[in-house]
Amino acid sequence: MVSFKELGLVNTREMFAKAVKGGYAIPAFNFNNMEQLQAIIQAAAETKSPVILQVSKGARNYANQTLLRYMAQGAVEYAKELGWEKPQIVLHLDHGDSFELCKSCVDFGFSSVMIDASALPFEENIALTKKVVEYAHQHDVTVEAELGVLAGVEDEVAAEESHYTKPEEVIEFATKSGCDSLAISIGTSHGAYKFTPEQCTVDPKTGRLVPPPLAFDVLHEVEKKLPGFPIVLHGSSSVPQDEVDTINANGGALKAAVGIPEEQLREASKSAVCKINIDSDSRLAMTAAVRKVFTEKPAEFDPRKYLGPARDNMKKLYIHKIVEVLGSDGKAE
Ligand code: G3H
Ligand code: 13P
Ligand code: ZN
Protein backbone atom coordinates (compact mmCIF):
# COMPACT_ATOMS: atom_id res chain seq x y z
CA MET A 1 0.00 0.00 0.00
CA VAL A 2 1.42 3.37 -1.00
CA SER A 3 -0.36 6.68 -0.55
CA PHE A 4 -0.42 9.08 -3.49
CA LYS A 5 0.75 11.75 -1.03
CA GLU A 6 4.12 10.01 -0.70
CA LEU A 7 4.52 10.31 -4.46
CA GLY A 8 3.88 14.07 -4.50
CA LEU A 9 0.53 13.67 -6.27
CA VAL A 10 -2.70 15.42 -5.30
CA ASN A 11 -6.35 14.36 -5.44
CA THR A 12 -9.00 16.35 -7.28
CA ARG A 13 -11.01 17.75 -4.34
CA GLU A 14 -9.50 21.20 -3.94
CA MET A 15 -8.58 21.45 -7.62
CA PHE A 16 -12.19 20.94 -8.71
CA ALA A 17 -13.65 23.27 -6.10
CA LYS A 18 -11.37 26.05 -7.34
CA ALA A 19 -12.10 25.28 -10.99
CA VAL A 20 -15.88 25.38 -10.53
CA LYS A 21 -15.62 28.67 -8.64
CA GLY A 22 -13.10 30.14 -11.05
CA GLY A 23 -14.94 29.22 -14.25
CA TYR A 24 -12.22 27.10 -15.84
CA ALA A 25 -11.62 23.37 -16.38
CA ILE A 26 -8.71 21.05 -15.57
CA PRO A 27 -7.21 19.18 -18.51
CA ALA A 28 -7.34 15.39 -18.22
CA PHE A 29 -4.88 13.99 -20.74
CA ASN A 30 -4.44 10.24 -21.33
CA PHE A 31 -0.93 8.88 -21.55
CA ASN A 32 0.55 5.61 -22.81
CA ASN A 33 4.17 6.47 -23.51
CA MET A 34 7.11 8.59 -22.46
CA GLU A 35 6.91 11.24 -25.18
CA GLN A 36 3.28 11.93 -24.41
CA LEU A 37 4.01 12.22 -20.70
CA GLN A 38 6.97 14.53 -21.31
CA ALA A 39 4.80 16.76 -23.52
CA ILE A 40 2.01 16.90 -20.93
CA ILE A 41 4.36 17.77 -18.07
CA GLN A 42 6.29 20.35 -20.10
CA ALA A 43 3.03 22.01 -21.13
CA ALA A 44 1.61 22.00 -17.59
CA ALA A 45 4.88 23.23 -16.05
CA GLU A 46 5.27 26.05 -18.56
CA THR A 47 1.70 27.25 -18.15
CA LYS A 48 1.48 26.43 -14.43
CA SER A 49 -1.70 24.50 -15.02
CA PRO A 50 -3.01 21.77 -12.75
CA VAL A 51 -3.16 18.57 -14.77
CA ILE A 52 -4.74 15.12 -14.60
CA LEU A 53 -2.76 12.19 -16.02
CA GLN A 54 -5.20 9.50 -17.06
CA VAL A 55 -4.52 5.80 -17.40
CA SER A 56 -7.08 3.84 -19.42
CA LYS A 57 -7.59 0.12 -19.72
CA GLY A 58 -5.94 0.29 -23.15
CA ALA A 59 -2.96 2.10 -21.62
CA ARG A 60 -2.59 -0.54 -18.90
CA ASN A 61 -2.68 -3.30 -21.47
CA TYR A 62 -0.21 -1.49 -23.70
CA ALA A 63 2.31 -0.05 -21.26
CA ASN A 64 1.71 -1.87 -17.95
CA GLN A 65 0.03 -0.24 -14.95
CA THR A 66 3.12 -0.51 -12.74
CA LEU A 67 5.34 1.18 -15.27
CA LEU A 68 2.79 3.94 -15.86
CA ARG A 69 2.51 4.63 -12.14
CA TYR A 70 6.25 4.93 -11.75
CA MET A 71 6.32 7.19 -14.78
CA ALA A 72 3.75 9.44 -13.09
CA GLN A 73 5.88 9.47 -9.95
CA GLY A 74 8.84 10.44 -12.12
CA ALA A 75 6.71 13.11 -13.74
CA VAL A 76 6.31 14.91 -10.42
CA GLU A 77 10.10 15.08 -10.03
CA TYR A 78 10.50 16.09 -13.68
CA ALA A 79 7.98 18.92 -13.20
CA LYS A 80 10.01 20.24 -10.26
CA GLU A 81 13.17 20.03 -12.33
CA LEU A 82 11.43 22.17 -14.94
CA GLY A 83 10.97 24.88 -12.31
CA TRP A 84 7.39 24.10 -11.25
CA GLU A 85 7.89 24.30 -7.50
CA LYS A 86 4.56 22.88 -6.38
CA PRO A 87 3.27 20.71 -9.20
CA GLN A 88 -0.42 19.86 -8.99
CA ILE A 89 -0.56 16.52 -10.73
CA VAL A 90 -3.34 13.94 -10.35
CA LEU A 91 -2.87 10.30 -11.35
CA HIS A 92 -6.30 9.08 -12.38
CA LEU A 93 -7.75 5.74 -13.44
CA ASP A 94 -9.84 6.36 -16.57
CA HIS A 95 -12.98 4.21 -17.02
CA GLY A 96 -12.34 1.76 -14.18
CA ASP A 97 -14.77 -1.11 -14.64
CA SER A 98 -14.65 -2.98 -11.32
CA PHE A 99 -14.23 -2.45 -7.58
CA GLU A 100 -11.11 -4.65 -7.63
CA LEU A 101 -9.40 -2.53 -10.28
CA CYS A 102 -10.25 0.73 -8.50
CA LYS A 103 -8.98 -0.73 -5.21
CA SER A 104 -5.73 -1.87 -6.81
CA CYS A 105 -5.15 1.65 -8.15
CA VAL A 106 -5.93 3.26 -4.77
CA ASP A 107 -3.51 0.83 -3.09
CA PHE A 108 -0.87 1.54 -5.69
CA GLY A 109 -0.71 5.33 -5.40
CA PHE A 110 -3.35 6.67 -7.78
CA SER A 111 -4.89 9.84 -6.34
CA SER A 112 -8.18 9.60 -8.21
CA VAL A 113 -10.22 6.82 -9.79
CA MET A 114 -13.18 6.64 -12.10
CA ILE A 115 -15.70 3.88 -11.62
CA ASP A 116 -17.60 3.73 -14.88
CA ALA A 117 -20.72 1.73 -14.13
CA SER A 118 -22.81 3.83 -16.51
CA ALA A 119 -23.83 0.77 -18.52
CA LEU A 120 -25.44 -0.81 -15.44
CA PRO A 121 -29.00 -0.12 -14.28
CA PHE A 122 -29.31 3.04 -12.13
CA GLU A 123 -29.44 1.30 -8.73
CA GLU A 124 -26.51 -0.98 -9.58
CA ASN A 125 -24.47 1.99 -10.79
CA ILE A 126 -25.13 3.68 -7.43
CA ALA A 127 -24.25 0.55 -5.45
CA LEU A 128 -20.94 -0.10 -7.23
CA THR A 129 -19.94 3.56 -7.16
CA LYS A 130 -20.74 3.73 -3.43
CA LYS A 131 -18.57 0.68 -2.74
CA VAL A 132 -15.63 2.30 -4.55
CA VAL A 133 -16.24 5.64 -2.80
CA GLU A 134 -16.25 4.00 0.63
CA TYR A 135 -12.88 2.38 0.00
CA ALA A 136 -11.25 5.28 -1.85
CA HIS A 137 -12.27 7.88 0.72
CA GLN A 138 -10.57 5.90 3.48
CA HIS A 139 -7.37 6.78 1.61
CA ASP A 140 -8.41 10.31 0.60
CA VAL A 141 -8.61 9.25 -3.05
CA THR A 142 -11.35 11.03 -5.01
CA VAL A 143 -13.89 9.21 -7.17
CA GLU A 144 -15.45 10.11 -10.50
CA ALA A 145 -18.66 8.34 -11.50
CA GLU A 146 -20.71 8.41 -14.69
CA LEU A 147 -24.41 8.72 -15.35
CA GLY A 148 -25.75 8.55 -18.90
CA VAL A 149 -24.14 6.73 -21.79
CA LEU A 150 -21.71 8.25 -24.25
CA ALA A 151 -21.73 7.14 -27.83
CA GLY A 152 -18.54 5.47 -29.03
CA VAL A 153 -16.54 3.11 -26.83
CA GLU A 154 -19.39 2.78 -24.35
CA ASP A 155 -22.09 2.32 -26.92
CA GLU A 156 -21.82 1.27 -30.52
CA VAL A 157 -24.44 3.69 -31.81
CA ALA A 158 -24.08 7.40 -32.52
CA ALA A 159 -25.10 9.93 -29.87
CA GLU A 160 -28.82 10.01 -29.36
CA GLU A 161 -30.84 12.10 -26.97
CA SER A 162 -32.11 9.03 -25.15
CA HIS A 163 -28.55 8.40 -23.90
CA TYR A 164 -28.13 11.84 -22.37
CA THR A 165 -27.87 12.05 -18.60
CA LYS A 166 -31.30 12.56 -17.08
CA PRO A 167 -31.08 15.68 -14.87
CA GLU A 168 -33.88 14.35 -12.65
CA GLU A 169 -31.59 11.48 -11.60
CA VAL A 170 -28.45 13.36 -10.60
CA ILE A 171 -29.37 14.42 -7.05
CA GLU A 172 -30.27 10.90 -5.98
CA PHE A 173 -27.19 9.51 -7.73
CA ALA A 174 -24.68 11.96 -6.22
CA THR A 175 -26.22 11.81 -2.74
CA LYS A 176 -26.52 8.05 -2.51
CA SER A 177 -23.21 7.18 -4.18
CA GLY A 178 -21.12 9.88 -2.48
CA CYS A 179 -19.04 10.42 -5.65
CA ASP A 180 -16.80 13.49 -5.83
CA SER A 181 -17.47 14.30 -9.48
CA LEU A 182 -19.88 13.17 -12.14
CA ALA A 183 -19.29 12.53 -15.83
CA ILE A 184 -22.41 13.31 -17.81
CA SER A 185 -23.53 12.65 -21.35
CA ILE A 186 -24.50 15.75 -23.35
CA GLY A 187 -23.49 14.68 -26.86
CA THR A 188 -19.73 14.13 -26.63
CA SER A 189 -18.28 10.73 -27.51
CA HIS A 190 -14.92 9.00 -27.66
CA GLY A 191 -12.60 8.85 -30.65
CA ALA A 192 -12.03 10.89 -33.81
CA TYR A 193 -15.40 10.14 -35.42
CA LYS A 194 -17.85 11.70 -33.03
CA PHE A 195 -20.66 12.30 -35.49
CA THR A 196 -21.68 10.73 -38.77
CA PRO A 197 -21.72 13.05 -41.81
CA GLU A 198 -25.52 12.68 -41.77
CA GLN A 199 -25.67 14.24 -38.29
CA CYS A 200 -23.62 17.25 -39.47
CA THR A 201 -24.23 20.22 -41.73
CA VAL A 202 -21.60 21.48 -44.19
CA ASP A 203 -19.95 24.89 -43.77
CA PRO A 204 -20.43 26.47 -47.22
CA LYS A 205 -17.21 28.51 -46.90
CA THR A 206 -14.82 25.70 -45.93
CA GLY A 207 -16.71 22.59 -46.99
CA ARG A 208 -16.01 21.17 -43.52
CA LEU A 209 -18.54 19.16 -41.50
CA VAL A 210 -20.21 21.13 -38.70
CA PRO A 211 -21.46 18.89 -35.88
CA PRO A 212 -24.71 19.42 -33.98
CA PRO A 213 -24.30 21.47 -30.77
CA LEU A 214 -23.84 19.86 -27.37
CA ALA A 215 -26.93 19.64 -25.15
CA PHE A 216 -26.18 22.68 -23.00
CA ASP A 217 -29.78 22.59 -21.76
CA VAL A 218 -29.03 19.23 -20.09
CA LEU A 219 -25.81 20.61 -18.58
CA HIS A 220 -27.61 23.66 -17.18
CA GLU A 221 -30.37 21.50 -15.73
CA VAL A 222 -27.75 19.34 -14.01
CA GLU A 223 -26.04 22.46 -12.65
CA LYS A 224 -29.34 23.68 -11.24
CA LYS A 225 -29.96 20.37 -9.50
CA LEU A 226 -26.44 20.12 -8.07
CA PRO A 227 -25.14 23.67 -7.58
CA GLY A 228 -21.34 23.79 -7.50
CA PHE A 229 -20.94 20.03 -7.97
CA PRO A 230 -17.96 19.10 -10.21
CA ILE A 231 -19.05 17.87 -13.64
CA VAL A 232 -16.81 15.98 -16.08
CA LEU A 233 -16.91 15.78 -19.87
CA HIS A 234 -15.44 12.73 -21.58
CA GLY A 235 -14.92 12.51 -25.31
CA SER A 236 -13.91 16.15 -25.65
CA SER A 237 -11.34 16.08 -28.42
CA SER A 238 -11.90 18.65 -31.14
CA VAL A 239 -10.19 16.65 -33.90
CA PRO A 240 -8.11 19.58 -35.28
CA GLN A 241 -8.61 19.63 -39.03
CA ASP A 242 -5.04 20.80 -39.72
CA GLU A 243 -3.71 17.63 -38.05
CA VAL A 244 -6.20 15.50 -40.00
CA ASP A 245 -5.09 17.24 -43.22
CA THR A 246 -1.40 16.64 -42.42
CA ILE A 247 -2.10 12.97 -41.76
CA ASN A 248 -4.05 12.59 -45.00
CA ALA A 249 -1.46 14.53 -47.02
CA ASN A 250 1.22 12.16 -45.80
CA GLY A 251 -0.31 8.81 -46.62
CA GLY A 252 -3.05 8.66 -43.99
CA ALA A 253 -6.69 7.85 -44.62
CA LEU A 254 -8.83 9.61 -42.03
CA LYS A 255 -12.16 10.28 -43.64
CA ALA A 256 -14.80 12.60 -42.17
CA ALA A 257 -13.15 12.75 -38.75
CA VAL A 258 -15.04 15.29 -36.66
CA GLY A 259 -14.85 16.44 -33.03
CA ILE A 260 -16.34 18.92 -30.57
CA PRO A 261 -15.83 22.55 -31.63
CA GLU A 262 -13.50 24.38 -29.24
CA GLU A 263 -15.92 27.29 -28.69
CA GLN A 264 -18.34 24.84 -27.10
CA LEU A 265 -15.67 23.43 -24.80
CA ARG A 266 -14.66 26.98 -23.88
CA GLU A 267 -18.26 27.67 -22.92
CA ALA A 268 -18.51 24.40 -20.95
CA SER A 269 -15.28 25.22 -19.06
CA LYS A 270 -16.93 28.33 -17.64
CA SER A 271 -19.72 26.22 -16.12
CA ALA A 272 -19.59 23.50 -13.44
CA VAL A 273 -17.64 21.39 -15.94
CA CYS A 274 -14.27 21.22 -14.22
CA LYS A 275 -12.56 18.26 -15.95
CA ILE A 276 -12.32 17.84 -19.71
CA ASN A 277 -10.94 14.59 -21.14
CA ILE A 278 -8.75 14.75 -24.21
CA ASP A 279 -6.99 11.78 -25.78
CA SER A 280 -7.74 11.53 -29.49
CA ASP A 281 -6.34 15.01 -30.28
CA SER A 282 -3.00 13.98 -28.83
CA ARG A 283 -3.02 10.82 -30.96
CA LEU A 284 -3.70 12.93 -34.05
CA ALA A 285 -0.92 15.40 -33.19
CA MET A 286 1.54 12.55 -32.68
CA THR A 287 0.55 10.72 -35.85
CA ALA A 288 0.63 13.89 -37.99
CA ALA A 289 4.17 14.75 -36.88
CA VAL A 290 5.47 11.20 -37.37
CA ARG A 291 3.91 10.88 -40.83
CA LYS A 292 5.39 14.22 -41.89
CA VAL A 293 8.91 13.13 -40.93
CA PHE A 294 8.45 9.82 -42.73
CA THR A 295 7.41 11.66 -45.90
CA GLU A 296 10.08 14.34 -45.73
CA LYS A 297 12.98 12.20 -44.51
CA PRO A 298 12.40 8.66 -45.77
CA ALA A 299 15.96 7.66 -44.90
CA GLU A 300 15.48 8.52 -41.22
CA PHE A 301 15.39 5.54 -38.86
CA ASP A 302 16.36 6.98 -35.47
CA PRO A 303 13.06 6.99 -33.51
CA ARG A 304 14.14 10.11 -31.66
CA LYS A 305 14.05 11.97 -34.98
CA TYR A 306 10.34 11.32 -35.41
CA LEU A 307 9.19 10.89 -31.81
CA GLY A 308 10.92 14.19 -30.92
CA PRO A 309 8.83 16.20 -33.43
CA ALA A 310 5.78 14.22 -32.29
CA ARG A 311 6.47 15.27 -28.70
CA ASP A 312 6.85 18.92 -29.75
CA ASN A 313 3.59 18.82 -31.66
CA MET A 314 1.72 17.27 -28.71
CA LYS A 315 3.17 19.88 -26.37
CA LYS A 316 1.93 22.66 -28.66
CA LEU A 317 -1.52 21.06 -28.63
CA TYR A 318 -1.59 20.70 -24.82
CA ILE A 319 -0.55 24.34 -24.32
CA HIS A 320 -3.24 25.43 -26.76
CA LYS A 321 -5.90 23.46 -24.87
CA ILE A 322 -4.78 24.79 -21.49
CA VAL A 323 -4.50 28.44 -22.50
CA GLU A 324 -7.06 28.88 -25.28
CA VAL A 325 -9.77 26.38 -24.41
CA LEU A 326 -9.86 25.37 -20.74
CA GLY A 327 -8.38 28.50 -19.13
CA SER A 328 -6.43 26.55 -16.49
CA ASP A 329 -3.12 28.36 -17.04
CA GLY A 330 -1.68 30.07 -13.99
CA LYS A 331 -4.00 28.19 -11.65
CA ALA A 332 -1.20 26.11 -10.08
CA GLU A 333 1.50 28.73 -9.44
O1 G3H B 1 -11.74 6.49 -22.90
C1 G3H B 1 -11.12 6.46 -23.94
C2 G3H B 1 -9.71 6.87 -23.99
O2 G3H B 1 -9.46 7.60 -25.17
C3 G3H B 1 -8.75 5.72 -23.83
O3 G3H B 1 -8.73 4.90 -24.94
O4 G3H B 1 -8.62 2.54 -24.04
O5 G3H B 1 -7.79 3.12 -26.34
O6 G3H B 1 -6.53 3.86 -24.32
P1 G3H B 1 -7.88 3.51 -24.92
P1 13P C 1 -11.48 11.74 -26.80
O1 13P C 1 -11.52 10.46 -27.56
O2 13P C 1 -12.51 12.71 -27.33
O3 13P C 1 -10.12 12.35 -26.75
O4 13P C 1 -11.93 11.43 -25.28
C1 13P C 1 -11.04 10.89 -24.35
C2 13P C 1 -11.71 10.43 -23.10
O5 13P C 1 -12.83 10.73 -22.80
C3 13P C 1 -10.91 9.58 -22.19
O6 13P C 1 -11.66 9.12 -21.11
ZN1 ZN D 1 -13.68 8.69 -21.49
Image: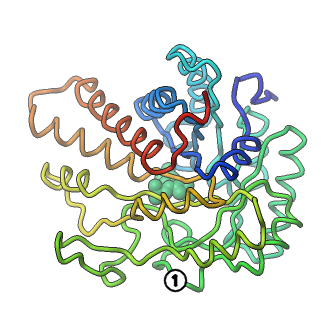
Residue 107 placement, left or right of 287? right
Residue 178, image x, y percentages: 86, 58
Does dot 1 land on a helix, a strand or a loop? loop
Q: Position of residue 287 (x, y in %)?
A: 28, 45
Pick out the residue farthest to the top.
81
- Indicate left or right for 121 with 289 as reference: right
Q: Which residue is mark 1?
A: 160
* The one of 175 and 331 positioned closer to us in this rendering: 331
Residue at screen point 17% across, 72% down: 205
Mark count: 1
Q: Position of residue 305 (x, y in %)?
A: 23, 25
Give the residue type at disc 1: Glu
Could you tell me which residue is drawn at 83 percent across and 75 percent down? 123
* Colour convention: rainbow
Mark 1 Cα-neighbour bin, 10 Å: few <14, some 14–19, many ≥20: few
Q: Is 314 on the left-hand or right-hand side of 49?
A: left
At x 35%, y 58%, the residue is: 239
Left-right relation of 240 to 130: left
Residue at image position (76%, 81%) is 168
Place of residue 147 in the rendered image (x, y in percent of width and height, measured from the top left) = 69, 70
Quadrant in which the N terminus appears: top right
Q: Quadrant of the C terminus?
A: top right
Is the CB atom of the residue marked by disc 1 within 8 angstroms of ligand 2's nearest atom?
no
Q: Quadrant of residue 262?
A: bottom left
